[in-house]
Every structure is written in structure tokens, then in C-alpha cells.
Image: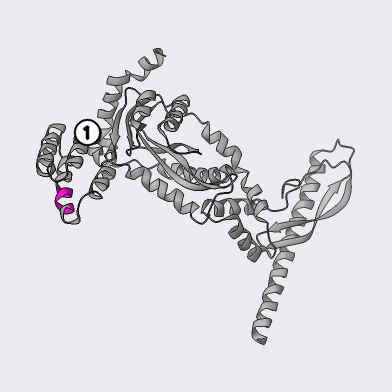
């Protein structure tokens, strides 16, 4: 017990020594700033006027009585901190980073209490993270490139508190350029996923400059294909094959799953549409009697399941499924899972934005596999559908 108490006392003394040292250095810097201020402004009829004490939270703990120099006219402002700032910039950045990583405001408050020796209320922490809201609004209105070879569309649900807690959707759009660079183009929070909602999302993407698209990829939400065609009538649509396969396997008996899986694979691993159609005929012939609804469903969806076969073979593994956007959605959920429910739409936007910005920064230097080889063919497809960049500009 004595050793533990002695150790704590020693640690406290060391902490106090460090804070005293930091305080002394900060006060020295501010005095030098004041001297420099008067040297650079000799024409001012102004004088030094002592100092005033204030608190400042630093990474070394709270300095209770930092002495800040002042002048009679209150013209001098130190660069050590901003007016009314009660913490160094590092603290705001740390809070935002922790929030971005999925920590709740209460968890952040508990962490800071251990570091600084006193608590920050969750509301205060939320206010600090509000500095990103201006960045979010600018990001949501930023201009987009004119051409994206692929748009991935997906929505995910989370618990959002308004008057009460309910599941609401976050719509997300990822674009891929003809050179293979990914970018989260936008996210949209609120309501229930619907084809009308997606049409509004795509209208906004178009408004911000994304006017020419070759292919839209998504799962089987009814009406989404029509919403895509309403905004991008020249674009192809690809239904996610992996979703279709999963849904099919869920409807068949366990003993048939392996055989049906192999027969479905023969369809979507074909080298051409003609070959895929022959494999579809074989699939239906084998399973029509035992599973008529499944056979009919594959026939009805065949065209939107095999669109990717019209595209360069090097990128087909990237475009027959929504895996790319699903991985991103998992990252959103991972960051949000520590929060049982989000207290506001703005709280959702903060987390989604910071993850999106992180992803876009990471992706900006990484091409998707296969697009380098496919780029000339994709460019030719753009020219065939939309004309050259110059022609499409002149036609506007």
C-alpha cells in the first residue's frame, strides 16, 4: 500500500513539474510575441498592461493560471491560442479523430478525464466536433468529374433518434473513373430506402457535374433500375450477382445447394452473353421441374445479371457485384456500432463524412485492378454513347 501511494505521489509531482515547465515556456513565448508586436507597430500609442490569468488544457494536463500578457488597447493577440479558446488545437483534433474512429462522446469524455484530470461533458465534446459541419456542407456541394465509368449504389440502415429512435437509411454512391480511381461521391441520410429516394440522390449527383455514366451497379431494390435510367438513360445497369446467388441458395434445400451453386457459377463465369445464355438454358432445364420459381426468376433477371459481360474482361471481377461498396458500408457500421442510437442527423453525418474523407484520401492514389488495361475500351464506350468531351460540352 505504502509503495502504491508513494508511486502515485511521485507521478503527481512529476506531472506538476512538467505542467510548470510547459506553463513557463508558454508564458515566455507570449512575452516574446508581445515584444515583437510593439517592435513591428511603433506608431501605435499603446503600452503594455501587465497580464491576466486563465485556464488552458494541454496534452500535459490543465494549466490553472496561465499568465497572458495584455496591452491597454487590447490590440495584441497571442498565436499560442485563439480568443476564448480553452484548449489547444491538439485537443480538438484528438476529439474529432476519436469520434471518427467510432468512440461515443461519453467514451471520449471518460478518456479525457483520465488524461487531463477533469471531465468534458458529452455536449461539449459534440460542440467541438461541430467544427467539421462546415467541411461537410462544402464536401456535399463539391463539384464532381463529368465522367464516371461505374456508379455503385447501396443503402444501409442505422438507428437515428428524432422524437424517438427508428431505423433510417444512409444512401451512398461510389464512383469509379475510366482510369480506375474510386471516390465516394456523396451520402444522404434519412427516411426509408426507395426508388424515389434514389432518383433524388442521383439527381443531386448529376447536378454536381457527374453527367456521363456507363454502368450503374446495385442490388435488387424494386424500382432502382428505373431511377437510374431516369437520370442516366444511356447508362447500363448491373444487378449484383452475389446477392442473386445468395437469395437463390436461401430458397433451395440443403442437399441441392452445392449442385445449384455450380450451375449458377457456370452462367456468370461465362466469357460472353451467348455462352451465358446457353448455360442459363442448361440451368433451367435441370432445375425447372423442382424449382420453377427460381428458374423463372433467373430468366427474368438474366439481362441485368450479365451486363458486365459486355465490358472489358479485366474489370469484370470488379463490376459483377457490389462488394466494393459493401466493404465501405461495413466500415461505416464498424465506426457507428459503439453508438446504440445516433442523437441527430448531424451526428450521423459527422461520422460518415470523416470515414468518407479518409477513404477518398486513401483511394486517390490507388487504381482498381484491371482498369488500366480496360481504360482505352472504356474511353471508346464513352465516345460512342456521349461523343467526345469537346462535343458533349458544345452540345450543352
Most foreground residue, 100 or 187: 187
Does the magenta run of residues contain 376? no
Q: Is residue 56 above or below residue 193?
A: below
- Give residue 287's position: percent from left, percent from top: 13, 44
Q: Nearer the viewer, residue 124 or 286?
A: 286
The residue depicted at 16 percent of the width and 53 percent of the height is 258
User: In the image, is residue 258 part of the stretch drawn in magenta?
Assistant: yes
> How far from the left and from the top, in percent, is residue 175?
39, 35
Span colored in magenta:
257-262
Of 222 and 388, nearer the camera is: 222
Which residue is situated farthest in the bottom direction here?
2
Say if residue 306 shows up in the picture. no
120 shown above or below 287: below
Residue 62 locus on image (x, y percent):
72, 61
Residue drawn at x 55%, y 55% as measured from the top left: 98
Residue with the most extreme top position = 395
Label 1, on which residue? Answer: 300
Name the residue located 14 percent from the left edge and 43 percent from the top edge: 266
Left or right side of 105 for 52: right
Give the left or right position of residue 305, taking residue 263 as reference. Answer: right
Q: Quadrant of the N terminus?
A: bottom right
- Please say whether residue 348 is visible from this viewpoint: yes
| For residue 158, side relative to residue 259 (left or right) | right
Q: Quadrant of the C terminus?
A: top left
**Total marks in image:** 1
Amino acid at each position: 500500500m505504502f509503495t502504491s501511494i508513494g508511486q502515485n505521489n511521485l507521478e503527481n509531482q512529476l506531472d506538476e513539474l512538467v505542467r510548470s515547465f510547459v506553463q513557463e515556456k508558454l508564458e515566455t513565448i507570449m512575452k516574446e510575441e508581445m515584444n515583437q508586436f510593439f517592435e513591428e507597430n511603433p506608431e501605435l500609442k499603446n503600452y503594455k498592461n501587465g497580464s491576466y490569468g486563465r485556464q488552458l488544457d494541454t496534452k500535459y494536463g490543465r494549466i490553472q493560471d496561465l499568465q497572458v500578457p495584455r496591452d491597454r488597447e487590447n490590440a495584441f493577440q497571442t498565436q499560442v491560442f485563439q480568443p476564448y479558446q480553452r484548449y489547444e488545437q491538439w485537443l480538438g483534433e484528438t476529439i474529432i479523430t476519436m469520434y471518427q474512429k467510432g468512440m461515443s462522446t461519453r467514451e471520449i469524455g471518460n478518456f479525457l478525464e483520465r488524461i487531463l484530470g477533469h471531465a468534458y461533458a458529452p455536449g461539449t465534446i459534440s460542440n467541438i466536433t461541430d467544427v467539421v459541419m462546415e467541411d461537410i456542407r462544402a464536401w456535399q456541394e463539391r463539384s464532381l468529374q463529368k465522367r464516371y465509368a461505374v456508379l455503385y449504389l447501396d443503402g444501409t440502415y442505422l438507428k437515428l433518434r428524432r422524437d424517438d429512435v427508428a431505423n433510417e437509411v444512409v444512401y451512398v454512391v461510389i464512383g469509379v473513373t475510366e482510369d480506375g480511381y474510386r471516390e465516394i461521391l456523396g451520402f444522404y441520410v434519412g427516411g426509408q430506402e426507395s426508388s424515389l429516394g434514389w432518383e433524388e440522390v442521383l439527381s443531386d449527383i448529376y447536378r454536381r457535374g457527374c453527367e456521363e455514366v456507363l454502368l450503374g451497379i446495385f442490388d435488387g431494390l424494386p424500382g432502382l433500375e428505373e431511377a437510374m435510367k431516369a437520370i442516366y438513360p444511356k447508362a447500363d445497369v448491373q444487378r449484383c450477382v452475389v446477392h442473386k446467388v445468395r437469395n437463390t441458395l436461401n430458397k433451395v434445400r440443403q442437399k441441392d445447394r452445392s449442385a445449384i451453386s455450380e450451375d449458377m457459377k457456370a452462367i456468370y463465369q461465362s466469357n460472353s452473353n451467348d455462352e451465358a445464355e446457353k448455360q442459363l438454358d442448361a440451368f433451367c432445364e435441370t432445375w425447372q421441374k423442382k424449382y420453377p420459381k427460381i428458374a423463372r426468376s433467373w430468366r427474368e433477371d438474366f439481362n441485368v445479371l450479365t451486363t458486365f459481360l459486355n465490358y472489358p474482361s479485366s474489370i469484370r471481377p470488379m463490376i459483377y457485384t457490389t462488394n466494393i461498396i459493401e466493404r465501405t458500408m461495413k466500415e461505416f457500421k464498424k465506426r457507428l456500432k459503439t453508438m446504440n442510437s445516433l442523437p441527430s442527423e448531424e451526428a450521423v453525418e459527422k461520422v460518415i463524412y470523416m470515414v468518407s474523407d479518409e477513404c477518398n484520401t486513401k483511394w486517390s492514389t490507388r487504381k482498381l485492378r484491371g482498369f488500366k488495361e480496360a481504360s482505352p475500351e472504356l474511353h471508346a464506350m464513352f465516345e460512342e454513347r456521349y461523343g467526345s468531351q469537346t462535343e458533349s460540352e458544345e452540345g450543352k
